Each structure stands twice: as C-alpha cells, then as structure tokens.
Amino acid sequence: MAYANMMRSGLTASKSLTTPFCAGTGVQQLRRRPLTSRAYSRRQFAAMAQATYDIWVKGSPEKNELGDCPFSHRMMMTMEEKGISYHKNLLDEQKMPDWIKDVCDGQKQIPFMKENDSGKWLYDSDKMVPYLEDKYPDKKKLGKPDECPQVGQELFPTKFVEFLTSKPGEDEDKKKKALIAELQSVNDHLEKSGKPYFGGDDVCATDLSMAPKIKHIKIGADEVKGWQVPSDLKALHAWMGRMSERDSWKKTYYTEQYVRDGWNLKVKKLSEES
C-alpha cells in the first residue's frame, strides 16, 4: 500500500488527503564515519550493479538516513525475509522529483521500485508484495496478503488516526475504545492460534504488514495522546517483541524519535486544516 491509496480508503473526510503521510522531521543517526560524496557515489553504483531491485523509500539522501514510512518498512522487511537483493534509494517526501509520476501512473508516492533485469517499475506495497511472491516461488514463502490471516483491517490508519485527531471528552473516549477494540482483535487472533506469528511458526505477509503499523501506533499514540497500548494485550506485545528481534527488522530499523516527530507534524497539519 502507498500513502495515496491508504488515505483514500481510510480518511476520506480529511483534507489531509493532499499531505504526505510519512512526513516527519526526525532522522536516524547512523553510527559511522560520513562518506565523502565521491566515495558514497562509488558505493552506490557498486550496490546498484549487484541488486535485483532498486527501491525508493522515505529518508534523507543528504544524510543517508532511513525514514519512518511504514509501507517502505514493510517492503524492505519482505525483501529481507525472502532474501531478495535490493538497493535502497532515499527520498525526502517534501522534495520528491516530478519523474516519479512517470513511473507511478501519475502519482508521487513511496515506496516504489524498479526490477533491474526487466526494467519494470512497480509501486504500491499492496501490489508489490504479491508480485514478489509470484516472481520468486523458490524463495521463502510468505504468502500473498489475501492468503494470510485478515486481522486489524480498520486499525491503521483509520482507527489510529481518528483517535490521534479526536477532541478531549466523549469523542476521544469513543475513538480510543474503537482503537482498543481493533487491537484486541489482533491480540485475540494471536492468543487463540497459540503460535508465535500470524503465519504460524514463522512470519507471513500479515506479520510484515502489521509490525510497522503497530510500531507507529505504540510510539505515535504515546507521543500525541500520552496513551499506551494496554499491557493486558500480552499476546500482541509478545509478538511485537519477537518481530523486533528478527534480522529483517534490525536491518530496516529507524528511530522512535523519527516516528514521534512525524506524527506530531501530521497531527498539527490535520488540526490546521480542520
């Protein structure tokens, strides 16, 4: 899924349809010596020559810092789990070049990617995930989204953003209860299955789609509303702990502060537009 499609389906009443969902001000600080522009270019070209795909995701190209877009996160985790080589290109959502429209059917959105052997362009994580599953049947099977458990369908962005933008009082209480109900349904599925992941003993497409969203919910709700996901949702918390220990998560990590900054900015824009 990408920002434009997500917002059309989840927040049709908001003027925020025209603003970038993954917009934020924070960045991930990488603990390594900065590369010179020439050395960085050489490394970039070498990586591109070896990669099966080039993928464009949210981040700072100037600082070489990965951004906090949950859909970019989903795609990179999927490719890591399947063992598909890729080279990530970082895009500042506030400075997205017009050429993106030429490869994304007239839209400016992330993530999107290029299949380097065929020259084929792909966009929208809801389309890219099943494409990779069909393209690489010999690699780790994750299942297509519609083949995997369907849980928390209204959780993100709908119920989450409705809660973040709710007014104190009855409206806020109502929206919070609706969010908790969605989280409870996710927890109940995990609890009843008795398995570590939605995919059973290993991850499936649902795990890789849901984990970045839960990360945003946990951090964003705490930052904006001072609210934490209930501790009695033990199966959900345990699952999130397992997801955060996976190599695919660690290799695609971005800081909590980046998420906090992003949601503060988003809610501010929504308030100004309402």
Image (spheres, rainbow, N blue to C red):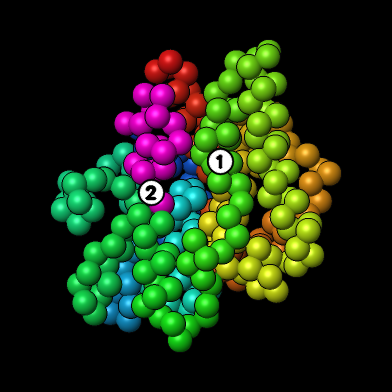
Categorize mark 1 by other alpha carbons within 10 Å: few (<14), some (14-19), many (20+). Answer: some
Question: Is residue 68 or residue 144 the one in the foreground?
Answer: 144
Residue with the mark numbered 1: 154
Q: Quadrant of residue 240?
A: bottom right
Residue 213 position in % (x across, y down): 56, 48
The three-letter amino acid code for the residue at tag 1 is Glu
Question: Is residue 125 or residue 271 the one in the foreground?
Answer: 125
- Mark with earlier residue (1, 2): 2
Relative height, residue 233 to residue 7 (above, below): below
Residue 85 position in % (x across, y down): 40, 77
Looking at the rendering, the stretch of residues picked out in magenta corresponds to 1-18
State yes or no: discs 1 and 2 in contact (Cβ < 8 Å).
Answer: no
Q: What secondary structure is found at the residue carrying circle 1? A: loop
Q: Residue at x 41, y 24 (%)?
A: 13
Question: Is residue 35 or residue 21 the one in the foreground?
Answer: 21
Tell me the chief SS of the magenta region. helix
Categorize mark 2 by other alpha carbons within 10 Å: few (<14), some (14-19), many (20+). Answer: many
The three-letter amino acid code for the residue at tag 2 is Ala
Residue with the mark numbered 2: 2
Q: Is residue 223 left or right of residue 113?
A: right
